[in-house]
Image (tube, helix red, strand yellow):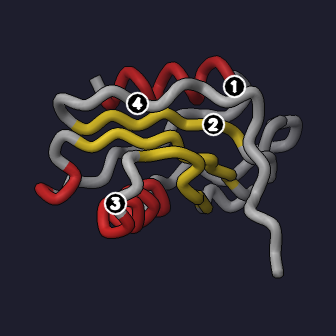
Amino acid sequence: MLRWLLSAAAALLFAPIAQAQALPPVPAALADTAAMVCAKIDVEGRVDAFVLDSTGDKARDDAVVTWVRQLHWPKAKRGDGGRGNWFPMPLQFGNAVPPAMPASCAPPAKP
């Protein structure tokens, strides 16, 4: 189910961007966890992320962000669109229901 969610999010939102090269292992601490993450892929293929909505467990939220940041895409090729933009990524690990899709993702305001 997780692979389908990631593939669907990437395909729908950023068709020109290739899918992640491989999924990192899912730690046991993320069992039955769901979250809505905002992610951004840079031109080098590195991923940044923050939790937009979740159950509110800080330890699990941190583990979700750590897991997402382990994803890696190939370097951008000329004409690849979408890099450097925040996009919603629903995540579901095991038996949990992800939060609803947001209209958009914006990074948290800096103090």
What residue do we see at 56% from left, 49% from top?
A: 73
Residue type at mark 2? Answer: Pro
Tag 3 secondary structure: loop
Which residue matches tag 3?
57
**Viewer-nearest of labels 3 and 2?**
3
The answer to which quarter of the image holds residue 21 is top left
| Mark sitting on residue 13 | 1
SS state under label 4: loop
- Name the residue type under label 1: Leu
Quarter holding the N terminus is top left
Q: Which of marks 3 and 4 is nearer the N terminus?
A: 3
- Residue under circle 4? 98
Compute the Cα span from label 1 to label 3. Answer: 28 Å
Q: Mark 2 points at which residue?
A: 88
Which label's residue is closer to the chain start, 1 or 2? 1
**Gap in Å between the C-alphas at discs 2 and 4?**
12 Å
